[in-house]
Image (spheres, rainbow, N blue to C red):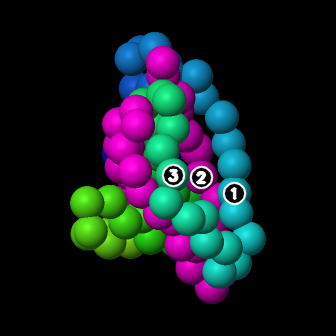
Amino acid sequence: MTQHEFEADLKREGYDVFYGGLRANHENPEHGHPWDARVMVIGGEITITRDGKAETFHAGDSCMVPANCQHTEKVGPQGVAYVAGRRQ
C-alpha cells in the first residue's frame, strides 16, 4: 500500500490523519491511548512491543494499535517519521 492509499483508507474509515516523528533512539515506556491508531512508517524505523512481542516497522510498513492496548515504542538509530490516524 502506498502512503497516498494509506491516507485515503484512513479518511474513508473515519480516522483523523496527522504526521509526526520521533528522534533517534527515543523510547516511550509502556502506555496506551484512548483511541484506535493506525500508523505507516515513511522514514526510519520503530519497534513496538505489545503482549510481550516486539515488532519492528520500516518505511512502507504499517500497523494498527487498538484503543487501550498497552505497548512500548523504541525508535531506531535514524529516527522515525510517520503518518498516523486516530479514531475514537
Q: Earlier in the sequence, mark 3 or mark 2?
A: 3
Front-most of 24 and 2? 24
Quadrant where the N terminus lies? Answer: top left
Task: Tell me the residue at 38%/71% (across/down).
Answer: 56
Direction right: furthest residue: 23
Task: Tell me the residue at 41%/37% (across/down).
Answer: 68
Residue 58 visible in this rendered orientation of the protein: no
Residue 21, numbered label: 1
Label 3, secondary structure: give it.
strand
Task: Tell me the residue at 42%/57% (across/down).
Answer: 71
Q: How far apart are the two marked residues, 3 and 2, measured between alpha carbons?
A: 19 Å
Residue 31, numbered label: 3
Q: Label the magenta part by its dominant secondary structure.
A: strand
Residue 49 visible in this rendered orientation of the protein: yes
**First to last magenta residue range:** 61-88
Residue 82, numbered label: 2
Report the amino acid beneath label 1. Answer: Gly
Report the amino acid beneath label 3. Answer: His
Residue 19 magenta: no
Q: Earlier in the sequence, mark 1 or mark 3?
A: 1
Q: Is residue 40 above or below residue 36?
A: below
